[in-house]
């Protein structure tokens, strides 16, 4: 049975606007990045030195890993506000394990497992409750902050031995190891989003959860897996940051949740989910790093820096609303 | 025929088009004070559009609305309210977390000095108002704790408080039981006696006949009749609604041999409202489900489609094996694919491409150890687009850019690619242009000819007759009647659907 080729395919009437808005958002990010680079380079020639650029990457490496994990959550219409506190708990788990056992390998394992388990628990709570991820993870965030203080007894757990030698001091071809870790995390997330069923399910759930359910996707299980995956990334970031600092601190992850979410959103992933890229997130992370760094080099005070960062994040979100 | 009483609202020559399609064509309409005016027509006859224009939710392309002595080219909702027009939907738009009194007085709360809310005065005045309307509702109760019927009464009380003198009721009894509906009819008659003009839209013709002073019939966007409620009868109304179409509905039916049953239901009842349903559907058979809203056609489709798991009693089997899915994916694994009416809300992932939407229910077949075979996915989508005549042939195009007909084809493609053997569809061609409708019907027939079983819910009489091998009319969660579409005309089908409506109206 064949039907005539002439179909009444009326292209939907409001097609072009939405696309253009999105592209605009993407280019805005690039333009802002370039502007910052040019202005800072003129104000301080040291900015463009290889050392400084590597320094920027080094400083954002833990953020980049956390933000990569957060990207797939936002694409799936989720959100995890507890990643900062979870990072502290993971870092402290690493530092405490190294202190008590002397084994760096066990320390790494402890941090990664802690992050993953916390993520999985968040995922179960989100998947089985009607409360929004925002409120649920706000609760776990507060809980984990308390746990971090209890674990540390309120003071730093110092000394991580070989972990510090690698992540704090070590480099390969002048590039510090944490920077490799960040790019690896981004690559892994890129592959998951593009080439795996898990990534595809994340897009489907974020785009239309009911349609995903009616297509037979095990929505709850996938949500738990996604939060656990993000938690794994947080655990890795916690281990690395502990190595960088040569200690575990109860406050080491403070503020990471908001900066990670900001980086994802600046990178073009909408809070309502259904679309997004981890390369965009990388752009968002670099933007945040560049802005801090350039303001440091230009001698802008810390309080002023926070205000400027806030403006950039707000502007990025407003631009997205249009898209 | 106009009563001598003054008119509450008058509509002259209202016309409205969507994308070149006439939804309303030069419609005149009037309601006198104290009149209950019924508005009837098939789905797509223009009732909803007309109500939207009356309530100010949409402007007409031309024509005018005269209310309270002022002529409006178009009303906006605020002007409509100010002019005394109130609309009550079957699910009233109220604030569930506020009290009954607070809902009635929303936006006009009694206040004490310094703008402080006077809850006591509000409760008192709400009680008085409700008593005057003969309603017995707890004024301080949270609205969300009340049932639909009570909420509807609150919405009507609110309209009275706002001094509305035109009340639009849209399918008000769809979610009510018999006693609740009778109570509502008494309330409507009381309001009319006090001078309220009521516009009553419903598919329940018995109700419309019993309650209306006059009835306007819409067909294909035109007003085809204005009749006195007392002089009309149901059969006459049905012929006016359907129209004496001489072009008989085409039934491209190739007579299929009776095959062994594929889906068997035995005494199935569930929390969705099904009551002891038994049914056999053969391989290659196309069964149409219909009935009035809430009659059970959608509930039955949800059970067969494996999306409603609130099983109470009875057994189902599929291809001889017991069938009791507890999750959608279990149904899909058995080859049962449910295609919802609401594409935007429940069907498609608008942010994803055509290809990704088509593959969504069968990614397992396009992946190995969790890794997607993207090139194969594109190939599959291209083949499916060709097979279904889906335009544009661009698998990477996001589905939100497609026309309604092509979006439905994409959904059908998903079900076909997921190896569907039993397709369960809700309103398979609603909102679709004529050409796409014909194509979708052809695809469904060809699936059936290849041995697939198809069950669809429709309120479109022509579609039921043209597509189904057997039409089942449901009422109160039961299959009331099975009709063969051969030599069945829309009029007789509508009359069969309406016969089911035995809700007494006195």
Image (cartoon, coloured by chain):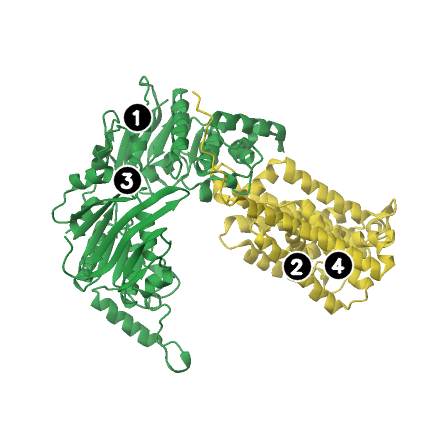
Chain colours: A yellow, B green
What's the residue at 64%, 40% (across, down)? Answer: A193
Nearest the viewer among B495 and A38 is: A38
Callout 1: chain? B
What's the residue at 39%, 25% (across, down)? Answer: B442
Residue under numbered circle 1: B250
- Label 2 element class: helix
Foreground mark, 1 or 3, reads 1
Foreground mark, 3 or 2, reads 2
Residue under numbered circle 4: A291
What's the residue at 24%, 54% (across, down)? Answer: B199
Q: Which mark is residue A157?
A: none
Q: Position of residue B115 (x, y in %)?
A: 41, 79
Q: Is residue B361 left or right of residue B269?
A: right
Q: Specify few, some or many for label 3: CA neighbours under 10 Å numbering under 14, 14-19, or 20 or more.
A: many
Q: Position of residue B284 (x, y in %)?
A: 37, 22
- The alpha-carbon separation of the residues under discs 2 and 4 comes to 11 Å
Nearest the viewer among B150 and B232 is: B232
Tell me if label 2 and label 4 are in contact, CB under 8 Å. Answer: no
Q: Which mark is residue A313?
A: 2
- The alpha-carbon separation of the residues under discs 3 and 4 comes to 64 Å
Query: Marks 3 and 2: same chain?
Result: no
Callout 4: chain? A
Q: Earlier in the sequence, mark 1 or mark 3?
A: 1
Tell me if label 1 and label 2 are in contact, CB under 8 Å. Answer: no
Tell me if label 3 and label 4 are in contact, CB under 8 Å. Answer: no
Query: Marks 1 and 3: same chain?
Result: yes
- The alpha-carbon separation of the residues under discs 1 and 2 comes to 60 Å
Callout 3: chain? B
């Amino acid at each position: 049975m064949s039907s005539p080729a002439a179909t009444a395919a009326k292209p939907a009437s409001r097609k072009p606007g939405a696309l253009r808005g999105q592209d605009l958002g993407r280019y805005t990010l690039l333009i802002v990045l370039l502007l910052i680079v040019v202005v800072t380079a003129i104000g301080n020639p040291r900015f463009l030195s290889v050392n400084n650029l590597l320094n920027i990457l080094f400083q954002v490496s833990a953020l980049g890993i956390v933000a990569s994990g957060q990207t797939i959550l936002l694409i799936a219409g989720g959100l995890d506000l507890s990643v900062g506190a979870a990072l502290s708990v993971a870092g402290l788990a690493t530092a405490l394990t190294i202190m008590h056992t002397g084994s760096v390998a066990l320390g790494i394992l402890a941090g990664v497992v802690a992050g993953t388990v916390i993520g999985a628990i968040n995922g179960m709570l989100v998947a089985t409750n009607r409360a929004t991820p925002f409120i649920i993870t706000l609760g776990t965030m507060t809980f984990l902050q308390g746990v971090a203080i209890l674990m540390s007894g309120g003071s730093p757990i110092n000394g991580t031995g070989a972990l510090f030698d690698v992540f704090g001091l070590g480099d390969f071809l002048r590039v510090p190891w944490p920077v490799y870790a960040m790019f690896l995390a981004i690559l892994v997330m890129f592959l998951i989003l593009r080439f795996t069923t898990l990534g595809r399910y994340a897009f489907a759930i974020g785009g239309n959860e009911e349609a995903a359910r009616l297509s037979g996707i095990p929505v709850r299980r996938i949500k738990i897996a996604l939060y656990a995956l993000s938690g794994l990334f947080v655990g890795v970031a916690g281990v690395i940051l502990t190595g960088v600092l040569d200690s575990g601190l109860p406050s080491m992850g403070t503020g990471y949740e908001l900066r990670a979410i900001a980086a994802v959103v600046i990178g073009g992933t909408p809070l309502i989910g259904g679309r997004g890229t981890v390369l965009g997130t990388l752009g968002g992370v670099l933007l945040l790093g560049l802005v801090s760094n350039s303001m440091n080099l230009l001698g802008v005070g810390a309080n002023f820096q926070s205000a400027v960062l806030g403006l950039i994040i707000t502007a990025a979100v407003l631009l997205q609303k249009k898209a | 025929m106009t009563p001598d009483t003054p008119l509450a609202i008058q509509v002259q020559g209202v016309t409205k088009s969507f994308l070149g399609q006439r939804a309303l064509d030069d419609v005149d309409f009037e309601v006198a004070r104290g009149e209950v005016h019924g508005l009837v027509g098939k789905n797509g006859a223009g009732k909803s559009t007309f109500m939207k224009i009356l309530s100010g939710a949409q402007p007409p392309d031309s024509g005018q609305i005269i209310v309270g002595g002022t002529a409006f080219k178009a009303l906006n909702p605020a002007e409509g309210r100010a002019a005394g027009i109130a609309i009550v939907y079957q699910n009233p738009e109220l604030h569930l977390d506020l009290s009954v009194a607070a809902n009635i007085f929303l936006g006009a709360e009694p206040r004490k000095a310094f703008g402080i809310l006077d809850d006591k005065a509000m409760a008192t005045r709400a009680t008085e108002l409700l008593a005057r309307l003969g309603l017995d509702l707890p004024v301080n109760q949270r609205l969300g704790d009340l049932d639909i019927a009570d909420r509807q009464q609150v919405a009507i009380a609110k309209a009275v408080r706002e001094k509305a003198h035109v009340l639009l009721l849209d399918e008000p009894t769809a979610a009510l039981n018999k006693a609740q509906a009778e109570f509502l009819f008494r309330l409507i008659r009381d309001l009319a006696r006090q001078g309220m003009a009521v516009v009553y839209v419903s598919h329940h013709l018995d109700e419309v006949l019993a309650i209306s002073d006059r009835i306007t019939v819409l067909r294909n966007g035109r007003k085809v009749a204005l009749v006195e409620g007392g002089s009309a009868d149901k059969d006459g109304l049905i012929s006016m609604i359907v129209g004496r179409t001489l072009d008989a509905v085409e039934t491209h039916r190739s007579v299929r041999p009776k095959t062994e049953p594929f889906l068997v239901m035995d005494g199935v009842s569930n929390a969705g409202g099904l009551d002891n349903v038994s049914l056999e559907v053969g391989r290659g058979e196309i069964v149409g489900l219909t009935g009035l809203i809430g009659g059970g056609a959608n509930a039955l489709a949800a059970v067969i489609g494996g999306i409603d798991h609130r099983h109470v009693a009875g057994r189902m089997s599929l291809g001889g094996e017991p069938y009791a899915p507890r999750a959608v994916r279990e149904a899909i694994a058995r080859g049962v694919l449910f295609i919802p009416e609401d594409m935007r809300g429940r069907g498609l992932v608008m942010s994803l491409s055509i290809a990704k939407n088509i593959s969504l229910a069968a990614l397992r077949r396009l992946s190995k150890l969790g890794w997607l075979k993207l090139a194969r996915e594109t190939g599959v989508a291209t083949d499916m687009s060709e097979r279904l005549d889906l335009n544009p042939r661009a698998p990477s195009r996001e589905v939100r850019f497609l026309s309604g007909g092509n979006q439905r084809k994409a959904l059908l493609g998903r079900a076909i690619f997921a190896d569907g053997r039993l397709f369960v569809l809700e309103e398979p061609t609603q909102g679709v242009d004529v050409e796409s409708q014909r194509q979708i019907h052809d695809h469904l027939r060809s699936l059936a000819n290849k041995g697939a079983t198809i069950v669809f819910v429709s309120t479109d009489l022509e579609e039921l007759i043209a597509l189904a091998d057997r039409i089942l009319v449901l009422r109160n969660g039961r299959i009331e009647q099975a009709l063969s579409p051969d030599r069945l005309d829309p009029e007789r089908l509508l009359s069969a659907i309406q016969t089911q409506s035995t809700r007494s109206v006195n």
